[in-house]
Amino acid sequence: MNLLLRRRKFIVNRKLQFSLLMISFSYAIFFLIVTGLALFVPLISKLDKADQASKQVFQIANQMIYLHDNFWPAALMCLIVIGLHSIRTSHRIAGPLYRVNMAFQSIKDCVIPKPLHQLRKGDYLQEEYEIINEMIGALRTKITDIQEAKTDYENASDKCMDTINEASRDELVKCLDEITEKGNLLKKKIEAIKIES
């Protein structure tokens, strides 16, 4: 119960969580209807066939009253527990999905996020979370490599531009070779990223 009270916000994805809640309730209500019919229909059938003044009618009526007094409160309690458990369980799905969606939104905005925080104990989507973290890690590495190669290329180009008026022919050739080498490395790193068509 302390775990339930510690979390401040159980509904993080209203549409998903309420959909899951409605599915849980529909299963529970279906079960209660079938169980209720299985308990009450035979008694109603017996009551209908029995002699109105007989002792059997009194016993059947007592059984029905007993069932009504005990079945419906238990059914209501089950619905409450199923509802609370459904919200808690859906939070274990919606919480990770919320973080994943935030990461995807960040990537869409051309900002590579840090790897996602570790999931809480009991959260679902553990394997998917690890794959997404691997994807983010790989993207971060490739983009960092490209940025470093671009910086090296720009530095080599700036260095060459600074010495162009004072450098000898050999120094200029060496400078241009370095720019070409850094440019080829940058090109290679960019081409390492494939875009499916």
Image (tube, rainbow, N blue to C red):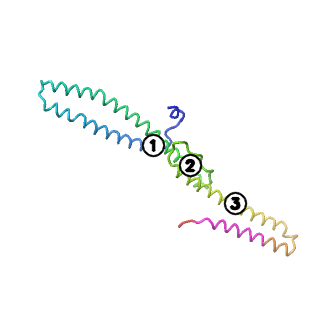
Residue visible at 54% across and 42% down in the picture: 121
Under circle 2, the secondary element is helix
Q: Amino acid at mark 1?
A: Gln
| Neighbours of disc 3 within 10 Å: few (<14), some (14-19), many (20+) | some
Q: Residue 181 occupies which quadrant of the picture?
A: bottom right
179 lies left or right of 53: right
Instruction: Report the residue marked by disc 3.
Output: 147
Instruction: Report the residue marked by disc 2.
Output: 102
**Marks 3 and 2, how far apart in space?**
24 Å
**Marks 2 and 1, how far apart in space?**
17 Å
From the top left corner, tell me how far across and down residue 151 is, in percent: 74, 61
99 lies left or right of 144: left
Q: Amino acid at mark 2?
A: Met
From the top left corner, tell me how far across and down residue 127 is, in percent: 52, 52
* Nearest to the observer: residue 86 or residue 38: 38
Residue visible at 61% across and 50% down in the picture: 115
Over which residues does the magenta segment extend?
177-194
- Label ID, residue 17: 1
29 lies left or right of 46: right
* Nearest to the observer: residue 63 or residue 189: 63
Mark 2 or mark 1: whose residue is earlier in sequence:
1
| Neighbours of disc 1 within 10 Å: few (<14), some (14-19), many (20+) | many
Under circle 1, the secondary element is helix
